[in-house]
Each structure stands twice: as structure tokens, then as C-alpha cells.
Amino acid sequence: MTLSIPLSAVSASVASPSPTTASGPTRLAALGYTLPAAPAAVGAYQTWARFGPYVTTSFQLPFKDGVLQHKGRLGEGVSLEQGMEAARICALNGLAQLTEAAGSFDGFRVIRIDGHVGCVEGFAHIPRVLDASSNLLNDVLGERGAHARTALGHLVMPLDAPVMLGFFAELFDQGKAS
């Protein structure tokens, strides 16, 4: 038996952000972060694509100021703490992409993130690494950050990145054209 829930029912359950709440950049600053510029693609693809009221991003790598952070695999050269930091950087880059797509920081809600962790065989802390990104999204976006998530481990990752995140979000005002 398959359970099917129409997207319209899911969308209706989350209200648009209240204008009286603190702005996203203010919440980020309170947590010690700033919203980076949306990273450029590192290949022949778009960094995000819109379809109807939805947007999906390419996988976000932990680039900070143009430099890939914490290259390598968790359990072999990359510590759990470094992996969690990489996950938070990926989340910030994802927020930057979604902000660009929506036209404003408050113009979207995250529906799902796809989390991938580069790790050694048997590494059992993939969910813990990705919780760092989920916690950041929930802390910054509140209800708009509540999301479903996949969590996968890989022996080899693009550019030897320790973490990468893909985002699927709903745009409140249709956002920009991709």
C-alpha cells in the first residue's frame, strides 16, 4: 500500500514568515554566522533550478571564501567536529543559493536536504554529522527550516569534499527564473 499526500496539503501546513520576526541575517549573526555569497558552479551545471513554486539546488560543498574546507574522509584525516563544521558551511551555502533563487532570505522554506558524507567503511556517525546542518537550518529558519533528510555515506566524494548537501525548497512568491 502506498500513501500519497498531495504537495498542496503539505504546503498549506506551513505559514509564510511573519514580518515581525527577526530577519534571517540577524538570526545568523546571533549564531555567529554571516550569509555567504552563493558559490559558483564548479562544473557545467546550474547552481539551482526553479520549477513552479519549487527550487532545487546542486549539491553544495563546504566552500568558504572560495576554498574547500576539510578535504578528505571522516574517520581518516577528517574529525567528527570538522565534518560537522563542513556540514554547517554546506548549509550556509545552501541558504545562499535558496536566497538567490527566492530573491530574499525570507522567501522560501526548506522541504528536504540530501546529505552525503565522505567517510571510511563502517563510519557510524553520518546522522550526527548531518545534524549540524539540520540544527543550523532549524535555528535560523524556525518552522521554515523543518525538513526531511536523506543521509548517505560514500568512500569517494567530488573534489575530496567531506560533506555535500542538496536542497529542495518551496518558494513563497515564485522567486527568480532559473
Image (cartoon, rainbow, N blue to C red):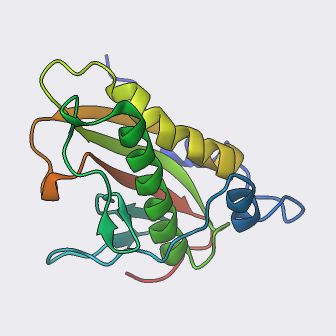
30 and 177: which is toward the camera = 30
Residue in view at x 18 percent, y 33 percent:
76
Give coordinates of residue 60: x percent, y percent: 33, 59
**Horizontal arrangement in the rendering, residue 144 relative to residue 111 (left or right):** right
| Viewer can see residue 58 | yes
28 left or right of 59 in image? right
Which quadrant would the C terminus be assigned to in this image? bottom left
Q: Nearer the viewer, residue 67 or 145?
A: 67
Whole-percent x, y for residue 57 in the image: 35, 63
Question: Looking at the rendering, which quadrant does residue 33 occupy?
Answer: bottom right
Work out which quarter of the rendered image holds the N terminus and state it: top left
Q: Residue at x 34, y 44 (%)?
A: 114
Give the quadrant of residue 151: top left
State whether residue 95 is above or below residue 103: above
State which quadrant residue 126 falls in.
top left
Q: Residue at x 19, y 45 (%)?
A: 72
Residue under the point 57% across and 68% down: 35
Side of 123 where 49 appears, left or right: right
Q: Residue furthest bottom?
A: 177
- Classify 97 as above or below 15: below
- Residue 118 appears at what percent x and percent y? 20, 39
Q: Position of residue 55 (x, y in %)?
A: 42, 64
